[in-house]
Amino acid sequence: MALLEMRQVRKIYRVAGEEVRALDGVDLDIEEGEFISIIGPSGSGKSTLMHLMGCLDTPTEGCVKLDGVDVSRASANRLADMRNRKIGFVFQTFNLLPRLNVLQNVELPLIYSGMRARRRRAQAMEALTQVDLVNRAKHRPSQLSGGQSQRVAIARALVNHPKIIFADEPTGNLDSQTGAAILELFRDLSRQGRTIMIVTHDPKIAAQTSRQIEIRDGKIGHGSTAPTHRSPSEEESGPPRWGAGGQDSRFNG
């Protein structure tokens, strides 16, 4: 069974009395551990697709299942519960709260889930260890570089041990070298068994993922690739080679 399944999914809006089909008959399977990109131009339907897969919205028609649970007609509270337990989000603008330090920002999803303070701090430090930012735990966002800020956002997405992470243009506000380091971090997380989905308009970014899903006019395009099934020899794991000061030693950004 796929981690995420979509069958004949449609999302229809009415704008100025006209019907707009943001998604039109989408069939899609996402397997656990895949490293995927959704690519398409502005207005193609890629953000709508991410919203439905990420339990931020429900379809007008069709079926969406996440980890075996049908969320097609779920209530707002049920969707929020699924997001909190099974999904992590990373955004282009980082969305860090400036008055909180790094550790407190990473703790936020665990606060919403009602976890006790001692346990959530330990879990947040574990997530910061995964992105090699423990030495920045007490810093505020204003004291971080763009790459460090995005890694805090990734730690926050990892902290509740989600089944899948959605990253919406995660390198859009970064220089090319720092962006390459962030993509390598996502690749390493995928090798460790995480399911990573990147939404992008950039073919160069999409080409670095194991599978590309092209969307145009609300439909999955012919350029999309099939699910990948990696052999054990391909399941290489290992943390990114972060250097002193929390920077990836392969890059200078």
Image (cartoon, rainbow, N blue to C red):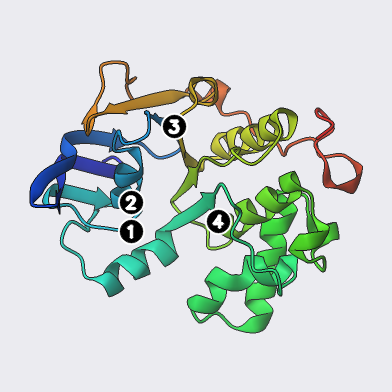
Q: Report if the CB atoms under discs 1 and 2 are less than 8 Å apart.
A: yes
- How crowded pointer 2 is (Cα within 10 Å; few <14, some 14-19, many 20+) is rated as some
Q: Which is more foreground, mark 2 or mark 3?
A: 2
Answer with mark 2 or mark 3, whichever residue precedes in sequence. 3
In the rendered structure, the answer to whether residue 85 lies left or right of residue 218 reads right
Query: Which residue bears the numbered disc 2?
Result: 51
Residue type pointed to by label 3: Ile
Residue type pointed to by label 2: His
Residue under the point 56% across and 47% down: 92
Query: Which residue bears the numbered disc 1?
Result: 56
Judging from the image, what secondary structure is the residue with disc 3 in? strand
Answer with mark 4 or mark 2, whichever residue precedes in sequence. 2
Judging from the image, what secondary structure is the residue with disc 4 in? helix
Residue under the point 70% across and 28% down: 176
Tell me which corner region of the image, top left, top right, bottom left or bottom right, holds residue 222.
top left
Image location of residue 147, percent across then percent down: 73, 44
Query: Which residue bears the numbered disc 3?
Result: 36
